[in-house]
Image: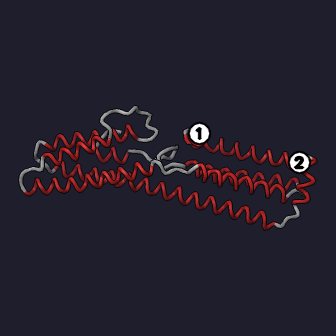
Amino acid sequence: MPIEFLVSLSSIGIFAVVFFCVSVVSMFLLAIMETPQIRQISQQLSQMTTAVVTVSGAIFALSVAFLANSVWASEDKARESIYAEARAIRVIETYIEAMTSPLQSKLSDIVDLYAMRVKAEWPGSGEEAVEPTAEQALSMMYAAVLRDPGQGDTARTLHQRLLVELDALSMAREQRLAMEQDVVSPGQWTLVIGLGVMLLLTVAISHAHYNLARRVSLCVLTISLSIMIYVIVLHHSPFVGPHAQTPDQILRAAGVSQ
């Protein structure tokens, strides 16, 4: 998929590809408008009211604003889910350190295993799936705590709080996994790109009598559209791309080397 190819590039590479594509569309429209057959038609259409260009620009701006707002919201939610997962691990580690039973060492090892499996399963990690998965490691923690409720009021209290934090860890993980699927859909890309091409076309037609003004206008629009699309591509998915979220917070919380 084109978007998958784009997000695999560096930030500079993404902008270069986006700028090239938008420039090709602009130059194609410019070349079409300067052909003898189209020139006459475009000069007649250039008499259309400037409101058409204004409305086209406003609709495009609104579509980009709504899409950008959705992208930023997804990124914030993804970051919050990661912080929640890391916070749950820190609390679990604190409770484990307070334990005195043989279960302490076992739980500590499972927490480390969970963090390493999260790192291996992280989108774009490039690592092959290794058993047990992070979900299985989480199940192992639940099983270990439930099998050994501990002796004494203090131990039982620790176990109860461990179960609460395991629930919080599981919920944070589920939210993070759900956010991994939250990307800009093909329909949203089609809408933005289609409205962008429409804006370029209306601007080119409205300057049919003024070649220099048309070229300057298309040049300015090309740069503007490229920057807007570039920023959206950078944040296309919270977990993919040059500015994607990383598992560093979770690894640090578990005390695992990155």
Q: Position of residue 129 (x, y in %)?
A: 38, 33
For the residues carrying marks 2 and 1, which lies nearer the camera in this image?
1
Of all residues, the one furthest to the left in this rendering is 152
* Residue 24 rendering spot, x and y as whole percentages: 75, 43
Q: Which residue is mark 1?
A: 1
Q: Position of residue 197 (x, y in %)?
A: 73, 52
Q: Is residue 192 left or right of residue 245?
A: right
Q: Where is residue 176 drawn, in percent x and y? A: 40, 50
Q: Residue at x 35, y 53 (%)?
A: 172
Crowd class of label 2 (few under 14; some 14 to 19; many from 20; radius 10 Å): some
Whether residue 226 appears in this view of the structure is yes
Answer with mark 2 or mark 1, whichever residue precedes in sequence.
1
Whether residues under marks 2 and 1 lie with C-beta atoms below 8 angstroms apart, the answer is no
Vertical order, 129 against 47 (above or below) = above
Residue type, mark 2 in image:
Glu
Quote the CA–CA distance across marks 2 and 1: 34 Å
From the viewer's perspective, is residue 43 above or below residue 49? above
Seen in the image, is 147 located left or right of residue 5?
left
Q: Quadrant of residue 220?
A: bottom right
Q: Nearer the viewer, residue 98 or 151?
A: 151
Q: Along the horizontal axis of the image, is 241 left or right of 162?
A: right
Residue marked by disc 2: 34
